[in-house]
Amino acid sequence: MKFISVLLISLGFLIACGEAIPHLEEIRERGELRVLSRYGPTTYYVKNEALAGFEYDLAKRFADHLNVKLKIIVPDNLNDMLNFIEQGKADIAAAGLTVTPARKDIIRFGPVYQQVTQQFVYRLGTKKPKNIAQLADGHLEVVAASSHVEQLHSLREEIPSLIWTENTELDSSGLLELVQLELIDYTIADSNELAANQILFPELRVAFNISEPQSLAWAMPFAEDGTLYNEMAIFFEKMDESGDLERLKEKYYGHIRHFDYLDTRAIDRRILTHLPKYQTLFEQAGEKFDLDWRLLAAMSYQESHWNRHAVSPTGVKGLMMLTQNTAKLMKVADRKDPAQSIEGGAAYLSYIKKRLPDDIVEPDRTWIALASYNVGLGHVEDARKLTEGSGGDPDLWPDIKTRLPLLSKKKWYERTRHGYARGGEPVHYVQNIRRYYDILLQQESTLELNSSASEERKLLPGAL
């Protein structure tokens, strides 16, 4: 109470003298960083009561850097967000905002942390426009107050007939869904948002880019006194120098950069036709070994496409494609029996995770374990040593995955204990499983209709 009284007296003195408290000091005194954001796969979302999203993770790290709590505020629309930050109703806006000349006149931007391109989006099966001048017969709809509107106004100087509708209620993901459902013909999306949404909307395609690469940055009130900006610059410099910024991008975008339309459509069909036969078995195995059952299902789809009779040329069999040695180690008598295969695969993944060093934390622990499931723990350990020897972090999957392909090159594998391996395969293996896992998470409502197990779900810490 004494501290509070002294603080109030000090605040009153400053106000009486007409002196404003520096912005950064104000945030630290209140113990809270107030951040405007928006719901979406690239920004901020809630999944199974866990908070996630690229912008959320970045903002949370900045709040930790300031040693304050993070408060996320989601305005009704983009226009409100820009107005709120302009009026100083929040400290920053962390929402994938593009730096544009018009915006720089009313709000202050922090350091650039990502580059995106504006892309013109249409639906597969409809006529692909060759350029933006060919839109006379189609309906183009974009998010109101967005950088896309600014770009269209610029293009209209060359194409006076260009028309579009500005939506004040839906965000970019909502408009992408309208294109998917054929309720509108076209929209414009930033390249990172389209990549993050394409698993959910596989028929969407890019007709052409309508901008050069553009910068994303956090926004602050134009009247910000520079103290918060300076600390933000220090924070981003540390994130960049440590490699944490690139690792965060890899976490959210690393497995979705190469979209496979046919593969995505295939798993969508098999979720309806094949998964219901085995879902309860995945759930039971997940419960027994403390694993997310959807991760096990994603593994199984990668291994066998949920075909219990699958057999590879090398003799691995069943839903989880177990080798004879692995089956023996996990006490699996019949590799083609779905229950035994799924439990054996879950047991083996759990076994690998327990053998990894304690310093490896989630979600890297799971991705490294999956790579080991594919190529062997020994080869992954070789890659970890190569990673450490070349200045990378052997406990982080983004660093390890760049060294695994070296195991197929004599210059590198002759230095290792376990020798040659096709190290590119586990990288693709993990990437595919992460993509399938995302699809299964996004199909939550469909899967719950099929579920006969507990309503409680386990989600990998930090996973999408």
Image: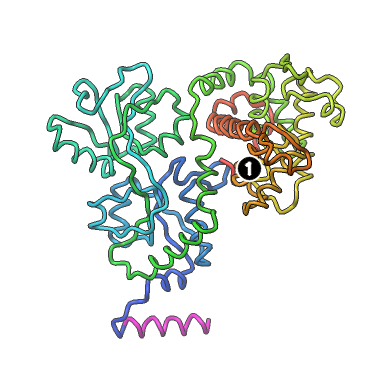
**Magenta region: which residues?**
1-15
Locate residue 186 relative to residue 294 in the image: left or right. left
The foreground one among 379 and 264 is: 379
Locate residue 118 relative to residue 49 in the image: left or right. left
Q: Residues within 10 Å of mark 1 (few under 14, many from 20)?
A: many
| Residue 90 % position (x, y) | 37, 60
| Residue 297 % position (x, y) | 66, 28
Q: Residue at x 73, y 16 (%)?
A: 313
| Residue 198 % position (x, y) | 45, 30
| Residue 43 % position (x, y) | 44, 46
Which coloring applies here? rainbow
Indicate whether residue 387 is drawn in magenta.
no
The residue under label 1 is 403
Indicate whether residue 8 is drawn in magenta.
yes
Locate residue 8 relative to residue 382 in the image: left or right. left
| Picture quarter with the C terminus | top right
Q: Residue at x 35, y 69 (%)?
A: 226
Q: Amino acid at mark 1?
A: Arg
Count of number-bearing discs: 1
Q: Quadrant location of residue 213?
A: top left
Note whether 34 is above or below 401 in the view shown: below
Q: Residue at x 43, y 43 (%)?
A: 39
Q: Secondary structure at mark 1?
A: loop
